[in-house]
Image: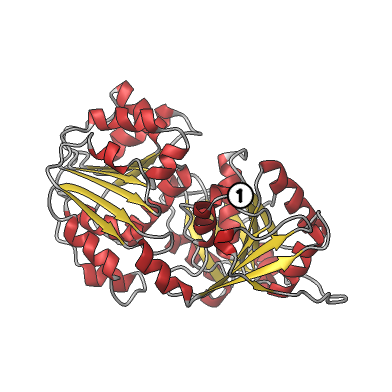
């Protein structure tokens, strides 16, 4: 496929490729192995999708590329980037939490040229013969070290055994993982190119990322966290905690204090996780409380602060968490909260002390947007343009009142200015969208 890199990059709002992205584009043009090492937030997804797309024959209905990812969120995010590139490439996500048969029907109907799959679900489809992989030319393992950390080594090796004919194996990581040589022995690639941009990219980020240490006078840090969030004045922040139970406890406390907060962890139902991320991404919530599940694979450019409520145990955890802010050329800040019996880890010893002064009668900054749920989606031929037109024509909104719009298979989400919500719901009561009756309401929060 002829890929106009300059047009794609500018269409996505960037001036030009970074040095890392240019190197990956060049290395990915020919058969062989590539190991790409670059920090989170440096644009690795676009870096490997550009050369991958150039290897696709858009006239063929056969599967030509497989991207293995550790989580369903990363699969969805990678596919979203591919869609943003606006190329004639058919793609599909395969992951657990939904019936395999439903995905099998989608595979037969769509005939994807690229699939983004979690290891277990990919092996399930391979076992059932649902995937014809004979024409697969490129195999990508994105965040492959995270796949290993989650215990997917056996599934990954099994999948590679079915994809031996692939001319290229690309391993993508944000850390220097020791397992790289072992995995390279499984591929038939004649040459292997290593692109290591970790040190260079980290140096470039230093000037855009400030690090602060916040002292909690009590072992229970909730009051200090409240003060810190008030200090941030509504800037989008991710609060990292160590356990799922802590997510529930901290988010409950913040909700009681009237913060616009969402919880996010691996024990939640998939639909609840997707809604939580949508609310945070679209500005309907400005605080996300999460386990390290959100430390990798989430692309939310507007995050301005990362808060380590529970201190990270390893330098790698610290790096991945911090990678949620100061993405691309944006600025960000990192805050480490230490209790009376805690000290900063060596890898964060340079954090600058930040005293917090209590602000009497200060209230949390409310979220700017409110999320709308629409009970129709892609399967009903509903598009983002349809939703935008409906909200403007039937709802009386202006484009400036409307934020992010996401359209799923059976539903759509739209963010509207909170000040316009009441009038909007009144205007569209009983109205049809694209000639279809459906439920349209404010999205329910957890």
Check disc 1 and report its element: helix, strand or loop.
loop
In the displayed structure, would residue 375 be above or below residue 7? Answer: above
> Which of the 4 quarters of the picture holds residue 286?
bottom right
Question: To which residue does mark 1 refer?
Answer: 439
The answer to whether residue 24 is seen in the rendering is: yes
- Name the colouring of the figure: secondary structure
Residue 253, located in which quarter of the rendered image? bottom right
Left or right of 172 on screen, residue 384: right
Farthest-out residue, right = 360
- In the rendered image of this protein, does residue 365 appear above or below residue 185? below
Image point 32% across, 71% down: which residue?
11
Closest to the observer, 169 or 134 = 169
In this figure, what is the number of numbered marks? 1
Other-residue count near label 1 (Cα within 10 Å), few / some / many at <14 / 14–19 / ≥20: some
Find residue 188 and report its horizontal and vertical position in percent.
15, 36
Quadrant location of the N terminus in the rendered image: bottom left
Can residue 428 be seen in the rendering of this structure? no
Seen in the picture, residue 268 relative to 348 is either above or below; the reply is above
Please provide percent x and percent y for residue 371: 62, 60
Residue drawn at the location 32% of the way across and 22% of the way down = 127
Task: Determine whether, in the image, residue 7 is placed left or right of residue 406.
Answer: left
Residue furthest to the top in view is 128
Q: Position of residue 378 (x, y in %)?
A: 42, 49
Of 56 and 347, the residue lying toward us = 347
Name of the residue lying farthest toward the front:
346
In the image: residue 128, left or right of residue 368: left
Residue 236 placement (x, y as % from top left): 61, 67
């Amino acid at each position: 496929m002829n890929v106009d890199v300059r047009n794609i990059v500018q269409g996505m709002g960037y001036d030009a490729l970074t040095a890392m992205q240019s190197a990956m584009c060049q290395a990915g043009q020919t058969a062989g192995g590539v190991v790409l090492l670059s920090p989170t937030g440096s644009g690795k997804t676009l870096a490997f999708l550009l050369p991958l797309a150039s290897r696709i024959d858009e006239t063929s209905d056969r599967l030509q590329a497989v991207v293995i990812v550790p989580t369903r969120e990363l699969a969805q995010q990678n596919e979203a980037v591919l869609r943003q590139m606006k190329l004639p490439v058919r793609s599909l996500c395969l992951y657990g939490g939904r019936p395999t048969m439903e995905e099998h029907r989608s595979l037969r109907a769509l005939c994807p040229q690229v699939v983004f799959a979690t290891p277990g679900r990919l092996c399930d489809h391979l076992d059932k013969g649902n995937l014809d992989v004979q024409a697969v030319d490129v195999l990508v393992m994105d965040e492959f070290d995270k796949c290993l950390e989650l215990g997917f080594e056996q599934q990954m090796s099994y999948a590679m055994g079915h994809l031996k004919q692939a001319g290229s194996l690309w391993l993508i990581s944000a850390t220097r993982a020791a397992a790289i040589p072992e995995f390279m022995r499984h591929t038939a690639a004649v040459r292997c190119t290593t692109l290591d941009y970790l040190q260079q990219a980290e140096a470039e980020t230093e000037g855009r990322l400030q690090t602060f240490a916040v002292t909690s006078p009590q072992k229970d840090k909730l009051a200090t966290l409240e003060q810190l969030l008030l200090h941030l004045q509504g800037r989008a922040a991710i609060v990292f905690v160590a356990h799922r139970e802590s997510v529930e406890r901290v988010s409950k406390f913040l909700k009681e204090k009237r913060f616009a907060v969402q919880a996010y962890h691996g024990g939640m139902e998939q639909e609840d996780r997707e809604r939580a991320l949508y609310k945070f991404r679209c500005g309907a919530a400005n605080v996300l409380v999460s386990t390290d599940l959100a430390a990798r694979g989430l692309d939310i450019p507007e995050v301005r602060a990362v808060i380590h409520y529970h201190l990270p145990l390893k330098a790698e955890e610290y790096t991945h968490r911090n990678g949620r802010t100061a993405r691309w050329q944006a600025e960000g800040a990192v805050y480490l909260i230490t209790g009376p019996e805690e000290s900063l880890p060596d890898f964060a010893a340079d954090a600058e002390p930040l005293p917090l002064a209590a602000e009497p009668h200060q209230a949390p900054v409310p979220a700017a947007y409110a999320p709308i749920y629409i009970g129709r989606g892609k399967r009903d031929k509903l598009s983002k343009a349809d939703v935008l037109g409906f909200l403007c024509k039937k709802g009386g909104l202006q484009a400036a009142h409307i934020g992010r719009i996401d359209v799923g298979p059976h539903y759509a989400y739209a963010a509207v200015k909170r000040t316009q919500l009441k009038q909007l719901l009144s205007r569209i009561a009983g109205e049809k969208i694209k000639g279809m009756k459906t439920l349209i309401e404010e999205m329910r929060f957890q």
